[in-house]
Every structure is written in C-alpha cells, then in structure tokens.
C-alpha cells in the first residue's frame, strides 16, 4: 500500500503554492495516465493535487486571431470544437487518432502533453530503466525495441513520446502557457519536450513549481492542405509506430511553406527545419516529398527490432505529404462515433 495525501486546488495560485511546497506532489487532471503509473508502482507521489475543477476548460480567441485552449479542455471536446474542426482539422484528426472515446472524454489537454512513455520496461519495475530509476541502465537498448525511437536517442534511453495530439501541436507551432512561483511564461512547443540525453527521467522543460494553464494556437491552421497519418498495429486503441503531421501552404503546384512533424520515432515530437526549408519553394511532387523524407531520416538509427521504422517513416512522410497536397487527409473514421 502506498499512502498519499489528496488536496483540491481552489485556483491556479493555490495549485502553484501547493506544488511548490511539496516537490514530490503531482497534479492530477483526468488521471488516465497518472493513476495507471501509480497502480503499477512506477510513480509514488506523496500528494495528489486535484486541478480538475479549475476554470481552465474553455477555448477562446486570442488577440492575434489564434485560439487559447485551456489546460483542462478534454481531448474529445477539443477535437469536436467547431473552431478546431474548421480551422485546425490537423489537430482534430490527431486527437481522434489517439486512445478511445472514453479515454478522450477524460484526458485533458495539459495531461496529454505530460503523459509518459509507453516503453514496457518503464512500466516493469523488475527491470532496469534510467527513466524510472536514474542510473539503473536501459533495458530496451539490448532488449525488445520494436516500439522505440530511431531519432534523437542517447545511450541512456531510446523511449518515444506517445502523444498524437502533440505531433499536430508541434507542426502547428503551438505555445504552452505555464504559471509558476515567478509568474506566467510562454514556451514554444519545440522547446517544451526534451530529448533523453543523460537525463531521460526529465521529460519536459516545465519547472517543478509550474502548472500548464493553456496551449495557444497561432492563426494559421493549414486547414486546406493537411494530413495526420498514424501507422499502428491495430486500427484503434494503439499507440503510433510512426505518425506524421503534415501541413502545406500551396500556390498552384508550388509549396510556399511546409510543416512536418513525426510521432513514434523520438523522445519528443520530431520536427526537422532543414526538411521543411527544402520543401518551401519546391514543386509539390513525390520527388520533393521523398527528398524531404531522406533529410528527416538522415541520422535515423534502428536498434534491431525497430529497424523497420526507418523505411516505414520514409513511406509515411511521402504519403502524408501527398495526402496533404491533394487535399485528401486521412479519413476521420472516429468522427462518426461520438
Ligand atoms: C489504454 C490507453 C491508450 C491510450 N492511447 C493513446 C494514443 O493512442 N495516443 C495518445 O496520444 N494518447 C493515448 N493515451 C494517453 C492519454 O491520451 C493520456 O493518458 C491523457 O492524455 C493524459 O491526460 P490526463 O488529463 O488524464 O492526465 P493525468 O493522468 O491526470 O496526468 C498526466 C501527467 O500530467 C500532469 N499534469 C496534468 N495536467 C497538468 C497541468 N495542467 N499542469 C501540469 N501538469 C499536469 C500530471 O501531474 C501527470 O504527471 C492512452 C491512454 C491509455 C490509458
Ligand atoms: S528506453 Fe528509456 S524508458 Fe525504456 S527502458 Fe530504456 S531508459 Fe527506460
């Protein structure tokens, strides 16, 4: 039995005060990841600070024409929000590609960003794992690595970030708003999650005393030419082997601007500015897409069981960009199930 205290935060300032006073405490929002981790004895918070009733569940327009999504907006409400469906369908499709309807009803925007890896050794407390027990070693590198990373790995960890929503948020250049003891700050999405390096136990650059209050979307949503392509073992209720979020701004047959982010391949949503730069000004053809895929994967490295991901990612990038260019995004089958 692991004892822990429970407290309900009355407002954001109270939540920050409570987390700053107890470094071993954790916020709980939807609980869909944290409770599992506690049951599996992977996480042992001394206190759960319940933030689920804070007034952070609205989607509002920002002054620059974008949207501010409260940290407690449930994933399902966000995917079906009329502004998201119309202006940011890439984000709607990515959310609907994740988990199940029941989970999306509970899962929050903030919690989705901070969900932890699905590396099976991380969940198995009988095995060494640098993320769970720093310094103990990495069981995956010489073990079963089928679901693991091919980009940005380190000798200490080859885990992937499991979120679908975050891949779209990376491509859209969202920002994360966080409040801590020193006030509010805005973090570029590319700087929010970390690569494992020699501190794989630290997933993000959120400070210990900070709470995520919102995610902000810039005005451009690439609504006409986008695609979220998720390749997985089953058609639903499975994490990505490889996923691709693509957004194109086209003029005739030429790409004015491209956004490309990958999931299932690295410790964070993977964006490659060189590949995007290569696409801008190029014709929207298979050749251009293949060249961009080669650039994204130029430093890719497999660990045996996951070698297939390199070719899978290459093909998924080309297919997602082709779908985006044609204006035929992946069908959103889940949308029929409300
Ligand atoms: C069976 C299963 C299948 C799944 N499949 C997918 C999938 O295919 N794709 C996918 O993307 N996801 C998938 N998920 C993950 C799911 O999306 C996440 O569990 C969910 O988004 C987490 O949100 P939550 O609100 O429940 O977080 P919680 O479990 O409440 O919290 C998660 C972490 O975030 C922290 N936290 C929460 N909110 C805040 C905040 N505002 N500020 C600071 N810290 C905060 C908590 O302290 C905790 O560390 C799956 C989950 C399950 C159980
Ligand atoms: S890949 Fe990372 S999470 Fe998985 S066993 Fe290695 S250190 Fe742990």
Image: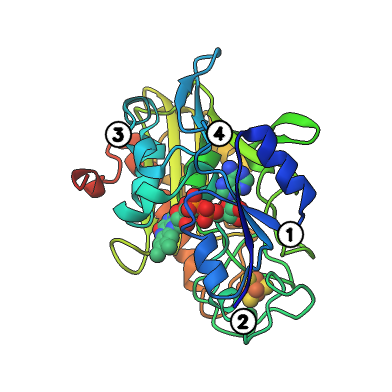
- Sequence-wise, the earlier of marks 3 and 2 is 2
Residue bearing the label numbered 3: 327
227 relative to 49, above or below? above
Disc assigned to residue 86: none
Q: Position of residue 220 (x, y in %)?
A: 48, 23
Q: What is the CA distance from the residue labelled 3 to the residue labelled 1?
A: 48 Å
Q: Nearer the viewer, mark 2 or mark 4?
A: 2
For label 4, the residue is: 215
For the residues bearing labels 2 and 1, Cβ distance under 8 angstroms:
no
Q: Is residue 137 left or right of residue 166?
A: right
Q: Which mark is residue 125?
A: 2
Q: Nearer the viewer, residue 167 or 10?
A: 10
Which mark sits nearer the N-terminus, 2 or 4? 2
Task: Respond yes or no on whether mark 4 lies under 8 Å from ligand 1.
Answer: no
Q: Would residue 167 appear left or right of 196 to someone viewing this image?
A: left
Which of discs 3 and 1 lies nearer the camera? The answer is 1
Which residue position is annotated with label 1?
24
Which class describes the residues within 10 Å of circle 2: few (<14), some (14-19), or many (20+)?
Answer: some
Mark 2 vs 1, N-terminal side: 1
SS for tag 2?
Answer: loop
Quadrant for the C terminus in the image: top left
């Amino acid at each position: 039995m692991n004892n822990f205290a429970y407290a309900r935060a009355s407002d954001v300032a109270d939540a920050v005060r409570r987390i700053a006073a107890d470094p071993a405490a954790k916020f709980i929002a939807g609980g869909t990841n944290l409770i599992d981790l506690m049951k599996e004895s992977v996480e042992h918070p001394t206190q759960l600070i319940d933030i689920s009733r804070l007034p952070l569940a609205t989607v509002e327009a920002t002054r620059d024409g974008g949207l501010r999504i409260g940290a407690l907006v449930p994933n399902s409400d966000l995917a079906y929000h009329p502004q998201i469906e119309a202006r940011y369908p890439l984000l709607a499709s990515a959310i609907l590609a994740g988990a199940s309807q029941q989970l999306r009803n509970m899962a929050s925007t903030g919690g989705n960003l901070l969900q932890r890896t699905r590396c099976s050794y991380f969940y198995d407390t009988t095995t060494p794992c640098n993320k769970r027990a720093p310094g103990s070693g990495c069981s995956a590198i010489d073990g079963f690595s089928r679901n693991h990373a091919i980009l940005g790995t380190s000798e200490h960890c080859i885990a992937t970030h499991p979120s679908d929503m975050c891949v779209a948020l990376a491509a859209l250049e969202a920002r994360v708003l966080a409040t801590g003891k020193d006030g509010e700050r805005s973090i570029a999405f590319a700087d929010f999650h970390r690569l494992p390096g020699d501190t794989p136990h630290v997933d993000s650059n959120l400070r210990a005393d900070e709470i995520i209050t919102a995610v902000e979307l810039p005005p451009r949503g690439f609504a006409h030419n986008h695609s979220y392509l998720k390749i997985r073992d089953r058609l639903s209720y499975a994490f990505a082997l490889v996923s691709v979020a693509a957004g194109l701004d086209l003029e005739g047959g030429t790409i004015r601007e491209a956004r490309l982010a990958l999931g299932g391949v690295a410790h964070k949503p993977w964006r490659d500015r060189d590949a995007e730069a290569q696409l801008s000004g190029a014709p929207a053809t298979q050749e251009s897409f293949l060249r961009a895929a080669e650039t994204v994967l130029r430093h890719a490295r497999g660990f045996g069981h996951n070698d297939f991901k390199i070719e899978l990612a290459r093909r998924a990038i080309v297919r997602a960009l082709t779908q985006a260019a044609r204006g035929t995004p992946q069908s959103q089958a889940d949308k029929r199930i409300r």
